[in-house]
Amino acid sequence: MEVTEDRISICGWPTDVVSIDHCVGTSGVSQPHTLIVFIPGNPGVIHWYVDFLFKILQTLGEGFAVRGVSYAGHGVGDDVVGTNEDHNTRMNSEQRENQGRRKMNVAWTMDGQVKHKVEWIDKIILEWNKNATIYEKSPTHKEFSSPKLIFISHSIGAHLVQCLLLERPDILARTSHIIHLMPFFRFDPPLLKKALLSTVAHNYRMTIPIMTAAVRCFSLTFPSRLIELCMKKIAGVDCEKGRKIAMDVFLNPKMVKNHLVLGTQEVRELPELPNVSIFTCFVNVSSC
């Protein structure tokens, strides 16, 4: 199997994407009939999930391929998380698109992240169609008019998947399965945690600057080796690769800000019960 990591522009944001494909025989060409489309939780950094997705594809065997995507504004580096100019944009929605060189609404709102994922899926399907002529020349070629989609999502990624499928019936019509992993913290949290999250979320104009300043201070005060040791011994992050990604992500105040602005909107605006409307639509489409 082959893992390809790339960075492409989606909705004006450089975004990390991952493709995992089977390679068959000497031709190196394997046409999938089904694409597993993975959308992570918040923080939406696809690199945390590569090993997990690799094992899924390894278990399923040939005929399947995996495509995964990070969130807009989530990852490592100013080209991904935004520049100082971008982040000078105020957090009140009416001014987000008027400053900086990017539309911060894409990274800072759930609607923006849904739009981001829709554009990514359109790119996937376009790529699949372009590659059809290559697959037709393969001796192992089979005729597939369009790829079936299996959506796997983690945490708040489940909400993004449901929104994009409701928005795009043509994508829903291609979908054979929807698998949501682990409900996100908005659903039935413990009472004290719920109160804390609600307080932070409703006072986000005050809490987010404080938390990002704390991250900046923490990253400048403590050596990286000590931070990594704490992550291993206290946080229980045993995977060295996972610790490296976490340090790169969470020691960047701009990335933390993107994570918190989106996360506090989740708490403020989403209901505490799942939206089951998409499953009704899915059943109706599947029965046709």
Image (cartoon, helix red, strand yellow):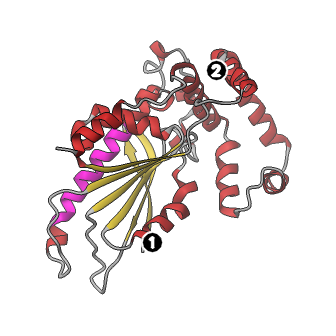
> From what the image shows, is residue 36 above or below residue 143?
above
Q: Residue 141: which quarter of the image? A: bottom left
Q: Which amino acid does label 2 sit on?
A: Ala
The disc placed on residue 85 is none
> From what the image shows, is residue 95 above or below residue 52?
above
| First-in-chain label (1 vs 2) | 1
Image side of residue 152 versus residue 258, left or right: left
Where's the N terminus, which quadrant?
Answer: bottom left
**Callout 2 crowding tier (Cα within 10 Å): few <14, some 14–19, many ≥20:** many
Where's the C terminus, which quadrant?
Answer: top left
Q: What residue type is labelled 1?
A: Gln
* Element carrying mark 2: helix
What's drawn in magenta, residue-wise? Answer: 116-132
Question: Relative to the observer, which residue lies in front, 173 or 135?
Answer: 173
The disc placed on residue 201 is 2
Magenta region, main secondary structure: helix
Q: Where is residue 154 in the image (x, y as percent from the top left)?
A: 52, 45
**Quick check: is 120 in the magenta stretch?**
yes
Are dots 1 and 2 in contact, CB under 8 Å? no
Q: Mark 1 points at which residue?
A: 58
**Quick check: is 281 in the magenta stretch?**
no
Q: Which residue is drawn at 57% across and 19% down?
A: 268
Q: Where is residue 149 in the image (x, y as percent from the top left)?
A: 30, 53
Could you give the CA–CA distance between mark 1 and mark 2, rounded to whole angstroms?
Answer: 40 Å
Question: Relative to the observer, which residue lies in front, 16 or 191?
Answer: 191
